[in-house]
Image (cartoon, rainbow, N blue to C red):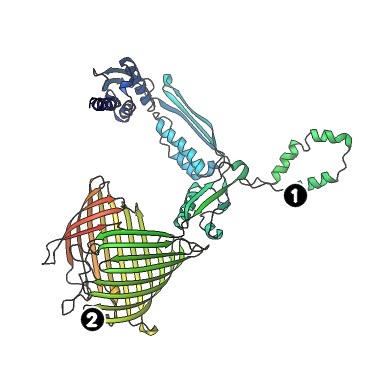
Amino acid sequence: MFSRVGAAALCLGMAQGALGLEARIDGLQGDVADNVRYYLDALDAAQYDRRRLEGEAIRRTREAMRVYGYYEPQVRSQLDEADPPRYVSLAIEPGPQVIIETIDIRLEGEAAEDEPFRDTLDALPLSEGDPLVHAPWDRMRSRLANLALERGYFDWSFIDRRMEVRPYDESARLYLSLDSGQRYAFGNITIRGNHIVEERLRSLAPFEPGDPYLAGEVALYAQRLGQTNWFSSVSVRPRLDARRELALEPPTLGWWNSVATEGEAALPQAPSTRAAMASGPRLSALALSAVTELHAAERASMPVDVALAPADRHQFETGIGYATDVGPRLQFGWNQPWINRYGHSLEQDFFLSQPEVRLTGTYLVPLADPLRDQYRFQYGLRHRDNEDTRSNEATIELARRWEFDNHWVQSLFVRATYEDFAQGGEKDSVFIYYPGVSWTRTRTRDPRFPTWGDRQRITFEYSDSIWGSDADFLRMTGNTEWIRMLGDDLRFVTRLALGAIETDDFSKIPPSLRFFTGGDRSVRGYGYETLAPRNEEGLLRGGQQMLAGSIEFQRRVTGNWWGAAFVDSGDAFDDWWPETLNTGAGLGVRWISPVGPVRFDIAHPFDDEDDSWRIHFAIGPEF
């Protein structure tokens, strides 16, 4: 027992002794005073006797003030009576601040004409006549060094780097001279460990051999290779260690070398002069200089080495979740990220919940740009049993996908669907096949719990009995969601969804294409897909139009816990514009878990006399 108490006391004493020395400053304020406190905060008073501690406090104070141009301050200190001392009182006369007399910055080599280097120099907030502050000068120097490596000046060096401070004269002279040398170009790409045809991998590179080197494009190449999901590990690196030997292409013999070689081979050599020729230069310095001027030196190049390891050919994933819309849910995925050397892939997914059972598969055929241009073949089987909807559905789809530079994705598709259904007591079965086009874009930061993001989707689908489809219709849908932060602790989430079907015979439209609203992701306070037109028996029939929107404010309570307040409104209907919309509002809690936000809401439906409130619970990312 006593040993435990002693150990605890020892730990407490060590923790107390490790606390920094508090500075109480008179005669100094602002950033300079804050810097003095920062320097003294790292001073462990327990490691010094009082005399040495006082001297160390003065030394650190002078050092902290020097970086703001105060080189001759007068500092008087007094420690408190505690042992070890907890604070030191400092009476400071800062003295004169050193003024910059000269700033001399020079760029030599190709960087002198490189705009980012010039911008860095122009952004220096110091000029002659200003008080000397070290930090901007040091930042500029570090930025120049980083730019040299980022932009391929691998032979760069500072040929002059001086800060001459004359406290007695209250002046400083700053000198900096950087010789960047020649800028390297991208060299050849060497790929090792690949199981996909090289042409497909090389097409992902954002650069060509001979382009000016940029470190950011090396990182982008690695990112693109990783996004294909073909590899378990990706390494893309410039060949820095061997740039002197390997970055330059092997020299080739020019015509002058060929002539010289042939000439030497043909000339008779006298025995008496051979040794003299071997011991002396064959060409004079003037001749060598003239020859080199005939041809400009080739630009240095930096080869890029790519090392890859194949991803597992079969990947399995299971998930268990719960949401008030569907109750408990189980998901099983089987993914084959690569099937052959051309990078074809197959993904199959099985989803099981109380109202729905679904099996889907996607076969992907990448084209010249694997990440942006693809063919997709999809199939799906689905059984639905929810409220007044009973449906068995089989679908196949062929799509062509493009991603544009503005990150919008366009998809042209042809879909065929057979659906045997009973909706609101009316039974039917239809076989429809129809083309469509969609445009989507998703942007997000931190997908687990976005602090910024938005998602848009617009789709048009058309079916006509001219080509044998059982239903004639034009269906249009649009969805938008936005997430923005106001400061660090206030989050704003809004969404809007709308849809419309133009048809002469709505009874032929299957439930999978009709509109229903209500639920966790629609209008909270109402049951899942319970808001839609009803028939004479009061059974859900589904709507030809739909409109639903939501506004939600979230505020951080502490750490990963957030509170939420929201208002949702929407409905599915037959005649545009509806006379009224169903509205729900409520409060909620958000917890940012490792698998995404956990959402718990209590919503009040304003247009439902039977229920005064409803609980909504869901787990998973918002996008």
Q: Residue at x 73, y 48 (%)?
A: 254
Q: Mark 1 or mark 2, which is nearer to you?
A: 2
What residue sits right under mark 2 in the picture?
A: 426
- In this view, the residue in front, 478 or 205, is 205
Looking at the rendered image, the quarter that the C terminus falls into is: bottom left
Q: Residue at x 27, y 74 (%)?
A: 514
Q: Residues within 10 Å of mark 1 (few under 14, many from 20)?
A: few
Residue furthest out toward the front: 1
167 sits to left or right of 478: right
Q: Quadrant of residue 109?
A: top right
Looking at the rendered image, the quarter that the N terminus falls into is: top left
Residue furthest out toward the top: 51
Q: Quadrant of residue 30?
A: top left
Q: Position of residue 41 (x, y in %)?
A: 31, 27
Q: Residue at x 86, y 43 (%)?
A: 267
Q: CA distance from mark 1 to mark 2?
A: 89 Å
Residue 230 in the image: above or below residue 277: below
What residue sits right under mark 1 in the picture?
A: 255
Residue type beneath disc 1: Trp
217 sits to left or right of 31: right
Residue 532 in the image: above or below residue 606: below
Q: Position of residue 215 (x, y in %)?
A: 50, 47
Residue 111 in the image: above or below residue 445: above
Q: Position of residue 494 (x, y in %)?
A: 26, 58
Q: Residue at x 34, y 54 (%)?
A: 447
Residue type beneath disc 2: Glu
- Using the image, tell me which numbered label, if any, was put on residue 91: none
Q: Residues within 10 Å of mark 2 (few under 14, many from 20)?
A: few
Secondary structure under tag 2 reads strand
Residue 93 is at least partly visible in this image = no
Residue 242 is at least partly visible in this image = yes
